[in-house]
Each structure stands twice: as C-alpha cells, then as structure tokens.
C-alpha cells in the first residue's frame, strides 16, 4: 500500500493521506484475518497445525471476532470515504474479496490466486488514494504482488497436503502434488520479478531500484532453495524471513528513489 502511494505521489504524500491509507490498510488486514479465522473455525480445529489458534482453542469467542470484523470493515469504509470518491466506490469490492477468500478452498484449487488478488488491492489502493485514477504502474505492481503472494501461499499450503486431501479441501498441492506445486510456485515468482521490473520501467526508477531487484531475486532464490518437496522444515524461515526481506527491500528502494 505504501509502495503504491509513494509511486503515485513521486514522493511522500501529505500526512493526512498517509494517515487514512494506514487506517484503510489496518482495517482491511484485520477484517480479512478475522473473517478467515471465523469462517475456518471448524476447519482449523480439525487441523493439528492450526488447532491452537485462538478460536478453536477457546481463547476468544466467535462473537468477539465478529465484532472485530464489523469494526474493521467500518474503519476501511471510513478511511476510503476520507480519501477520494473512487476509493469509496471501490471499498465494497475490497470487502467482498476479503470475505470471499476463505470460502474458495472449499471449491477451487485457485484459492491461492484469490489470496493474491486480495493482496494486489493494497498497492493499487495506495495508488488510487493519491492519484484518484488508474495507470499502468499500479497494475504492474498489483500483478507483482498477486503472483508473489500466490506463489508463496502455494508453498505454505504444502504443509496441509494430507489434511486437505482427507477432508476434501482444495489447493494446488492437493490437486497436483507437492512436486508440481513447487514448479508452479517458481513460475509465479518469475512473473512477480518480471512485473517488478516493469514497474521500474513504467515509473522511470534508477540504479537503487535495479539493485533492489537483484536483492529480491536472491531472496526468492533463497526461499526456494531452503525448501524441498521432501523437507518443509524451514517453512517459517522461508515464509517470514524471506518475504519480510522482500517487502522491506522494495519499500526501502522506493523511498530512496522517490525521496
């Protein structure tokens, strides 16, 4: 979201815009997580990997999660209203995508693509919050986030292969097996890197961004090297360390280039 905002402004927007973009991002993120936990309550309880999450473990109540969900959607709507008319017109679509994601694994192995689409709304929304109109740059950035998120979500889903097949949930690993899932993830991450390259071309970014692309390529390579179809023990390192590194590298490069 901040990347889209910086690119649209070609620098740092006003504090007011930054404030409402931050609240919109916070509201959307919290609403999406709350909806996912509530919708998947019974699924999480039956999965040994997720049985200790707050709802299935009885640490919080379903009503409190729904209250949090409603408040978060309200915050998203308020923030979108404060930004510009286009953002306010689009916030119900963002909410629909957020709410719909958790249901997709019940009927399609393309659930990873839906999650990628949800996350792609962030950079596009950050751009629209500033510019109030569409352009090629945020769409390329959205495609980069779409394929990056979908790619690592495919890897993450490999942990639940046996459980998903047992209970009839859909995912790329459950549908095609872990070997093909790894190849699909690699392909998605190649597209993600090429899309980031296109962002640099559209936005006229320079040497620092080019160096950041090299670092991001190395982090993606690292993510795929430490995981193997027969050894997922380094999933937390791959999922959190590599992806946090990619996020901060991208944001840091844009801050340097644009400020």
Image (spheres, helix red, strand yellow):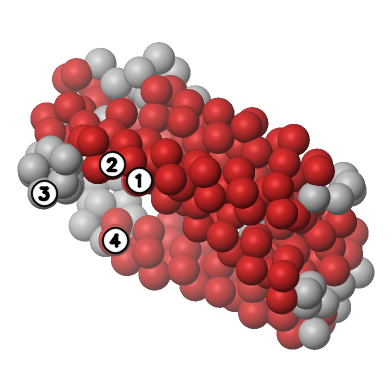
Q: List the residue tagged with mark 1.
A: 68
Residue 193 visible in the picture: no
Screen quadrant of the C terminus: bottom right
- Looking at the image, residue 211 sits to the left or right of residue 41; the answer is right
| Circle 3 or circle 4, nearest the eye | 3
Q: Position of residue 124 (x, y in %)?
A: 73, 49
The residue tagged 4 is 236
Give the CA distance from mark 4 to mark 1.
27 Å
Q: Are marks 1 and 2 in contact (CB under 8 Å)?
A: yes
Which callout, 4 or 1, points at the residue further toward the start of the chain? 1
Query: Which residue: 32% across, 51% down?
Result: 228
Q: Write down the quadrant of residue 174 in the picture.
A: top left
Q: Which residue matches tag 3?
A: 59
Q: CA–CA distance between discs 3 and 4?
A: 23 Å
Whether residue 76 is visible here, answered yes or no, is yes
Cβ–Cβ below 8 Å for labels 3 and 4? no
Determine the secondary structure under disc 3. Answer: loop
Q: Is residue 187 left or right of residue 110?
A: right
For the residue pair 51 and 78, the one nearer the viewer reads as: 78
- Residue labelled with disc 2: 65
What SS does tag 1 mark?
A: helix
Is residue 217 or residue 206 the one in the foreground? 206
**Above or below, 142 relative to 48:** below
The mark found on residue 124 in the picture is: none
Q: Earlier in the sequence, mark 3 or mark 1?
A: 3
The numbered mark, 3 or 4, whose residue comes first in the sequence reads 3
Q: Residues within 10 Å of mark 2 (few under 14, many from 20)?
A: some
Find numbered disc 2 in the image and state the secondary structure of the residue it sits on.
helix
């Amino acid at each position: 979201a901040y990347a889209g905002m910086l690119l649209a402004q070609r620098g740092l927007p006003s504090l007011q815009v930054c404030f409402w973009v931050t609240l919109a991002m916070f509201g959307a993120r919290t609403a999406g997580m709350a909806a996912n936990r509530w919708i998947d309550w019974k699924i999480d309880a039956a999965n040994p990997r997720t049985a200790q999450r707050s709802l299935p473990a009885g640490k919080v109540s379903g009503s409190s999660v729904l209250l949090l969900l409603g408040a978060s959607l309200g915050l998203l709507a308020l923030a979108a209203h404060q930004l510009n008319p286009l953002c306010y017109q689009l916030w119900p679509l963002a909410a629909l995508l957020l709410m719909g994601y958790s249901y997709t694994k019940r009927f399609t192995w393309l659930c990873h693509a839906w999650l990628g689409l949800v996350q792609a709304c962030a950079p596009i929304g950050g751009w629209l919050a500033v510019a109030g109109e569409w352009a090629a740059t945020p769409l390329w950035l959205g495609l980069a986030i779409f394929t990056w998120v979908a790619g690592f979500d495919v890897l993450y889903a490999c942990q639940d292969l046996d459980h998903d097949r047992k209970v009839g949930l859909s995912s790329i690993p459950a549908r095609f097996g872990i070997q093909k899932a790894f190849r699909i993830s690699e392909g998605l991450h190649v597209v993600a890197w090429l899309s980031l390259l296109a962002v640099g071309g559209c936005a006229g970014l320079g040497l620092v961004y080019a160096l950041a692309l090299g670092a991001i390529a190395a982090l993606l390579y690292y993510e795929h090297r430490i995981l193997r179809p027969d050894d997922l023990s380094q999933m937390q390192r791959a999922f959190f360390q590599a992806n946090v590194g990619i996020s901060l590298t991208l944001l840091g490069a844009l801050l340097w280039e644009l400020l």
